[in-house]
Image (cartoon, rainbow, N blue to C red):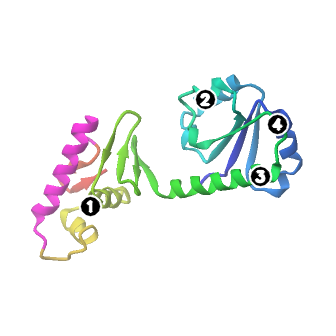
């Protein structure tokens, strides 16, 4: 996972305080004098919502709250009152722990995010619920750079060395490819090649 960092938007005093005590924690700190600069940076990053980051801003920052680039689960909103630094650091640490858990329970393949907990594959427009077996198939194919045969899938996904009919594997993959085609209009997520299946 990339290094954790926080972005402080339009709260320069808080930035100054945290910079003074930055040796006490392991995350990086960025300061943005105005929300427009921060949103421009987010637009350049394109995947800010997926980064290991926390955004701290005032509760009345409407420009930030309406931005579609911002993951609201990464926001800490504070009132314009004296801030208890220890309490704020506790909130930051808890949010980083949650992000780490979420990061470990999902992975990205091509233009899709697979969430292992909810068993959902999604892109920016749609999402699709998968079965445990479908998640296992995708996870196995993701790990290999070469096409995988039906026998390899039998051994590694179904954990059978023999006794499983080949059409069982082929049927599962056919249904999975059809689900993805119907939901995302994507024929090329799992490729069916002469040597086997590949993502």
176 vs 61: above or below: below
Numbered circle sitting on residue 172: none
The foreground one among 61 and 34 is 61
Earlier residue among tags 4 and 3: 4
Q: Are marks 4 and 3 in contact (CB under 8 Å)?
A: no
The extreme right residue here reads: 20
Type of secondary structure dominating the magenta stretch: helix
Q: Which residues are magenta?
A: 164-188
Marks 2 and 1 sit apart, C-alpha to C-alpha, by 38 Å
Residue 65 is tagged as 2
- Judge whether residue 168 is colored magenta: yes
Residue 103 location (% of width, % of height) = 52, 54
| Mark sitting earlier along the chain (4/2) | 2
What residue sits right under mark 3 in the picture? Answer: 87
Q: Residue at x 19, y 63 (%)?
A: 150
Task: Describe the element under mark 3 as helix, strand or loop.
Answer: helix
Residue 79 seen by the camera: yes
Disc 4 versus disc 2: distance between alpha carbons?
20 Å
Q: For the residue carrying disc 1, how many other residues have a C-alpha within 10 Å: few (<14), some (14-19), or many (20+)?
A: some
Which comes sooner in the sequence, label 3 or label 1? 3
Q: Considering only order in the chain, which callout, 1 or 2, is on the residue closer to the N terminus?
A: 2
Query: Which secondary structure, mark 4?
Result: loop
Q: Residue at x 13, y 62 (%)?
A: 168
Of badges 2 and 3, nearer the viewer stands: 3
Mark 1 lies on residue: 133
- Please name the residue that numbered disc 4 is placed on: 81
Q: Indicate which label's residue lies in the foreground, 3 or 1.
A: 3
Q: Residue at x 87, y 51 (%)?
A: 21
Residue 193 in view here: no
């Amino acid at each position: 996972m990339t290094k954790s960092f926080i972005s402080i938007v339009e709260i320069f005093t808080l930035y100054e305080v945290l910079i003074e005590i930055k040796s006490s924690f392991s995350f990086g700190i960025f300061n943005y004098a105005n929300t427009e600069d921060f949103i421009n940076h987010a637009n350049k990053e394109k995947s800010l919502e997926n980064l290991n980051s926390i955004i701290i801003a005032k509760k009345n920052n409407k420009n930030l709250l309406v931005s579609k680039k911002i993951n609201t689960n990464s926001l800490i909103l504070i009132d314009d009152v004296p801030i208890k630094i220890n309490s704020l650091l506790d909130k930051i640490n808890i949010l980083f722990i949650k992000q780490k858990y979420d990061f470990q329970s999902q992975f990205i393949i091509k233009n899709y995010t697979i969430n292992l907990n909810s068993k959902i594959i999604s892109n920016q427009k749609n999402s699709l619920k998968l079965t445990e077996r479908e998640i296992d198939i995708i996870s196995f194919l993701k790990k290999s750079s070469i096409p995988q045969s039906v026998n390899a899938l039998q051994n590694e996904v179904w954990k059978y060395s023999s006794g499983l009919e080949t059409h069982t594997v082929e049927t599962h993959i056919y249904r999975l490819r059809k689900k993805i085609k119907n939901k995302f209009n994507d024929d090329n997520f799992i490729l069916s090649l002469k040597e086997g299946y590949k993502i």
